[in-house]
Image (cartoon, rainbow, N blue to C red):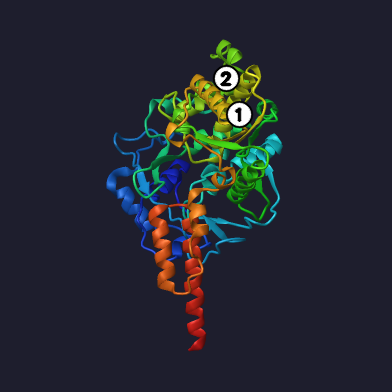
Amino acid sequence: MVCATASWFGVMETIFFALTLRCKRPPGSLWNNQEQSVPRSEISTCFQQGFRAPFADEWKPCWQRRANSRPCATFYCPTASPGAASEGPGAYRGGVRVSGIHAKNASRSILEMTAKQARAFLLKPESYCSLDLPPYFTFAKILSAVSKELLGKSVASMSSKPRDHEGVNYSMLSNRDGRHAWRPFQLIHPALYVSLVEHITKPANWKMVCDRFKEFQAPANFKCLSIPLETSANGVDKAAQIRNWWLGIEQGSIELALEFNYVFHADITDCYADIYTHSISWAVHTKPLAKAKKTDKSLIGNIIDSHIQDMRHGQTNGVPQGCVLMDFIAELLLGYADLELSNRLKVDSITEFQVLRYRDDYRIFVQSPEAGERILKALTEVLIDLGLKLNSGKTSGSLQVVASSIKADKRAWIRASQNEQNLQKHLLIIHAHGIDYPNSGSLTVALTQFHERLVKASESKTREF
């Protein structure tokens, strides 16, 4: 989005408030691959409603606002896109164009990068905002402007501390199931985001973080498949992440069905919202050292903790969700939990198992239900020590290792009649699937395939005339 303003904080506000605009566009234009911009007249109208924060001449963050001026946008992200293929290059998954999801795109983990490469990766617009926003929202210019403005400066040196103000980040709600499952996301204030990236990717800090991850990944029985990935120059990073999930979790689970008799599924309740920020330092430096040096502002764990508190009005519970940086920080804590769990299971002489983890979702493969229950109990104890807990409603065990390795909505769609020649009947099948599995990935694929049929039918009729 191109906005003319003298202050980069003004640019940030323009982008944030533009997110709340309801722009009338022709059908399908929302998902055009070309960059678009919201008309300035609409942005001006938004500012005339009294939202624009008064700024002094000096360099000040935009968290100094008038009371009650922070908007909180509630939005529905489209999950199907006209004109997109259901598989292969150009496919859409969850509203995001996936380039070559089944192609063998070269990708690398953030842990394989140098400090300089990691900085560049985290400052990419798609890393700053991993939400499924329309393509005419772009954050490249503001991230570049903030990086230049913050060069040699520290957020801590400002006269006004961000944690003293509410509404530093921009909050949004996304619906997961079309009903009542709302999930909060945040766009982090760019000054805090860039500052935290700069600290983490200092060579000494980056080496410490990467070395710590090597310790987390040492246990052979544990495999984490959600470390952020960067794909090749022409690819989409989110596509690499989706492919990694498909290969590592879905296909990996099917392979493990040859070795194990049972699989247990579990996930953490409100993981990001419940993360205790002090525990991040425990994960980086070990708990005893972090507690002994909790006032040492040079420790990268304490720096991360402080920045997150700045983003959340001084709160020590919860991290913002919606960017690669916070996914990476969450992996620090969850990797620490993996290591703690591994150590406990060694003490209990539990060795015949395999854990696949994708962020806060666990798949535990064992030979008996008793072993699975013991591992779940140990996992619960580890998570409680970190202020987290398992979601009892989503914790289950199954003898059907292969069947339970594939999501229920995907299994249902595979069984459905997808080759119905009549367009109306085909749409009714999709409608029935959507009622049972709203906002699901399989529904996205089904709608995309149906749209392709409509396009081909329209083109065929046009050629006839």
CA–CA distance in space, label 2 to label 1: 12 Å
Above or below, comparing residue 10 to residue 431 in the picture? above
Pointer 2 residue: 282
Disc 2 versus disc 1: nearer the observer: 1
List x then y, in percent, for residue 12: 45, 44
- On the question of residue 203 being in view, the answer is no
The answer to whether mark 2 and mark 1 are in CB contact below 8 A is no
List the single residue furthest toward the bottom. Answer: 465
Q: Amino acid at mark 2?
A: Trp
* Disc 1 element: helix
Foreground pick, 237 / 26: 237
Q: Nearer the viewer, residue 340 or 329?
A: 340
Q: Residues within 10 Å of mark 2 (few under 14, many from 20)?
A: many
Q: Secondary structure at mark 2?
A: helix
Q: Is residue 464 something one can see in this rendering?
A: yes
Image side of residue 411 versus residue 171, left or right: right
Residue 171, horizontal then vertical, whole percent:
40, 40
- Up/down of 66 relative to 246, above or below: above
Residue 283 lies in what quarter of the image?
Answer: top right
Callout 1 crowding tier (Cα within 10 Å): few <14, some 14–19, many ≥20: many
User: Going from the N terminus, do you reach mark 2 or mark 1 first?
Assistant: 2
The amino acid type, in three-letter code, at marker 1 is Gly
- Which residue is at the front of the view, 15 or 445? 445
With 52 as the anchor, is 105 left or right in this view? right
Q: Position of residue 138 (x, y in %)?
A: 51, 51
Q: Which mark is residue 335?
A: 1
Q: Is residue 359 left or right of residue 423?
A: right
Position in image of residue 168 (x %, y %): 41, 34
The answer to which image quadrant residue 270 occupies is top left
- The residue sitting at 70% across, 28% down in the picture is 218
